[in-house]
Image (cartoon, rainbow, N blue to C red):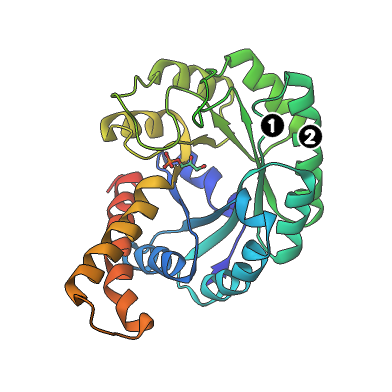
């Protein structure tokens, strides 16, 4: 149906108190699984790629496949650069055909974060695409810095981001202990920014009742990477064990793996949509 920017997806989701799932993919099979899940759920979806893949040809090579999948999908799909670390990667993503970018300046001092994010927003808007920024810091093996409401408001106005990632107690990767999600902080940020779609990073393992609560407050995009990509690894291992050393062409080998990944993503897409 359509390759779209996040602006065709997230403002409506925020208004309707639902969220769009944003899944990190790493290859054709994981991307195909997301397409299948979104089509099965008749829901839009965001396919995103780690910044790391922009350090080599991987992200640009993969873009050809992702663009083709998005264009043949019968649901709207955005292609997004996740946690962009430089303006070069932002420009490379836009050049390769991704329709949305994130510049993650969340470890930088406030003014510096504003400066680089604003440049990324200008690049994205100049290309007719959408841009996400992050204020506060969602831990990535380092320390969390929860988002301060006033800073979020100033950051949004100064950068003109189309979607804002906030830090409200989640962390990237599997949790060692149950996280404490600050739903009240999310509500306050959302009330101060009534029209701006908010983004939840670190979706893996976040208790679903908390995810539901923050979607009601204004989270319109939920990022899922680790648990989805781990489904791919675990189900590949299970299929290999079944083979017990016998040969099978890899395209056939991956069919059930894609189905397992699609089923996992479909459950989440349905939940985020409030169904
Ligand atoms: P998880 O790996 O915790 O799902 O986080 C995903 C994410 O936020 C990607 O930006």
- Residue 221 to residue 233: above or below: above
Residue 202 in the figure: left or right of residue 88: left
Of callouts 1 and 2, which one flags the residue occurring earlier in the amino acid sequence?
A: 1
Q: Within 10 angstroms of label 1, few (less than 14), some, or many (20 or more) residues?
A: many
Image point 28% across, 57% down: which residue? Answer: 234
Q: In this view, does 40 lie above or below 68?
A: above
| Residue drawn at 51 percent across, 46 percent down | 12
Image position, residue 120 (x, y; %) = 77, 43
Quarter-of-image position of residue 246: bottom left
**Nearest to the observer: residue 154 or residue 36:** 36
Drawn side of residue 144 relative to residue 150, left or right: left
Side of 247 where 115 appears, left or right = right
Label 1 beta carbon less than 8 Å to ligand 1: no
Q: Is residue 114 visible?
A: yes
How far from the left and from the top, in percent, is residue 212? 32, 34
192 vs 33, nearest the viewer: 33
Image position of 243 with respect to 86: above or below: below
**Tag on residue 116?**
2
Find out whether the residues at labels 1 and 2 contact each other: C-beta distance under 8 Å: yes
Q: Residue furthest front?
A: 245
Element at badge 2?
Answer: helix
Nearest the camera: 159 or 232? 232
Measured in 3D between alpha carbons, the distance from the residue under mark 1 to the one under mark 2, in whole angstroms, is 7 Å
Secondary element under disc 1, as helix, strand or loop, is loop
Up the image or down, 142 lies above or below 68; here it is above
Q: How many labels does the image show?
A: 2
Which percent across, then down, holds residue 171?
44, 30
The label shown at residue 188 is none
Disc 2 crowd rating (10 Å Cα; few below 14, some 14-19, many 20+) is many
Q: Name the residue under label 1.
A: 105
- Viewer can see residue 195: no
């Amino acid at each position: 149906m359509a390759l779209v920017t996040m602006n065709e997806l997230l403002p409506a989701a925020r208004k309707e108190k639902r969220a769009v799932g944003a899944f990190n993919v790493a290859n054709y099979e994981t991307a195909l699984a997301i397409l299948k899940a979104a089509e099965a759920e008749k829901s839009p979806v965001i396919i995103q790629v780690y910044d790391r893949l922009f350090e080599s040809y991987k992200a640009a090579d993969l873009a050809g496949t992702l663009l083709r999948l998005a264009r043949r999908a019968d649901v709207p799909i955005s292609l997004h650069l996740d946690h962009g670390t430089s303006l070069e990667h932002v420009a490379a993503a836009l050049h390769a055909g991704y329709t949305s970018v994130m510049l993650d300046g969340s470890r930088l001092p406030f003014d510096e974060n504003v400066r680089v994010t604003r440049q990324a927003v200008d690049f994205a808007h100049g290309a007719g695409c959408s841009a996400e920024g992050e204020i506060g810091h969602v831990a990535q093996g380092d320390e969390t810095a929860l988002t301060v409401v006033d800073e979020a408001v100033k950051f949004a106005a100064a950068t003109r981001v189309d979607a804002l990632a906030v830090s409200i107690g989640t962390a990237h990767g599997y949790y060692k202990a149950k996280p404490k999600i600050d739903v009240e902080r999310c509500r306050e940020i959302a009330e101060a920014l009534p029209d701006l779609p908010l983004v939840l990073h670190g979706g893996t393992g976040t208790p679903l009742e908390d995810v539901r609560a923050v979607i009601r407050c204004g989270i319109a995009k939920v990022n899922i990477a680790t648990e989805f990509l781990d489904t791919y690894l675990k189900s590949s291992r299970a299929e290999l064990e079944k083979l017990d050393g016998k040969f099978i062409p890899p395209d056939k080998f991956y069919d059930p793996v894609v189905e397992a990944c699609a089923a996992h993503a479909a459950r989440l897409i349905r939940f985020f949509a409030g169904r």
